[in-house]
Image (cartoon, rainbow, N blue to C red):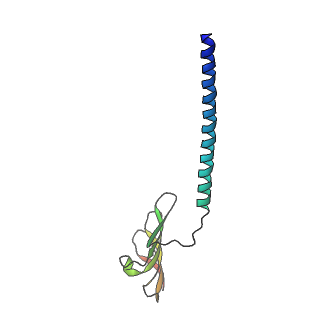
Amino acid sequence: MENQKTVEGLLERVRLLETQVRRGKRLGAALVMALLAIMFVGANISSDVIECKFLTIQGPDGKPRIRFFGGNANQFNGRVTMEILDPKGLRACEAFWDPNGQTGRFTVYKNDNSGQVLSTIP
């Protein structure tokens, strides 16, 4: 008789445990789906404007390849500048406009690590 009560008690405990596991799985699945929905909605939010004073775009190797300077007075005398860098990180070419927006220049540098100008278009 004692064994029957113990077995019945164990069966009841197993049923309760199975119920809790099912509820846990459902809750976990609901949380994962909610997280995915939040990530999907967040990924679809479009931004038409990115605002910053300095922007660097890196290549697949993690090295800077393009740099944009937004006209900060501490950077290139306030010029708005775009630099394209070679794989070694040296300037390959740059384009800039002065703070007043009246003049600009496109410059290509020699590919010999000297930093000398190869060609300039005013």
Instruction: Determine whether 105 is above or below 64 in the image.
Output: below
Q: Is residue 16 left or right of residue 114?
A: right
Residue 85 visible in image: no
Residue 1 visible in image: yes
Q: Residue 113 location in percent, x, y?
A: 41, 68
> What residue do we see at 59% from left, 47% from top?
31
Instruction: Determine whether 3 is above or below 90 in the image.
Output: above
Residue furthest left as drawn: 74
Question: For the image shown, how many numbered marks are present on the structure?
Answer: 0
Q: Nearer the viewer, residue 68 or 50?
A: 50
Q: Nearer the viewer, residue 85 or 48?
A: 48
Q: Residue 83 location in percent, x, y?
A: 46, 73
Q: Residue 36 location in percent, x, y?
A: 61, 52
Residue 114 appears in which quarter of the rendering? Answer: bottom left
Q: Residue 85 location in percent, x, y?
A: 47, 68
> What residue do we see at 63% from left, 18% from top?
8
Instruction: Determine whether 31 is above or below 20 in the image.
Output: below
> What residue do we see at 44% from left, 71% from top?
54
Residue 49 appears in which quarter of the rendering? Answer: bottom right
Residue furthest bottom as drawn: 102
**Quadrant that contains the N terminus:** top right
Q: Nearer the viewer, residue 49 or 1?
A: 1
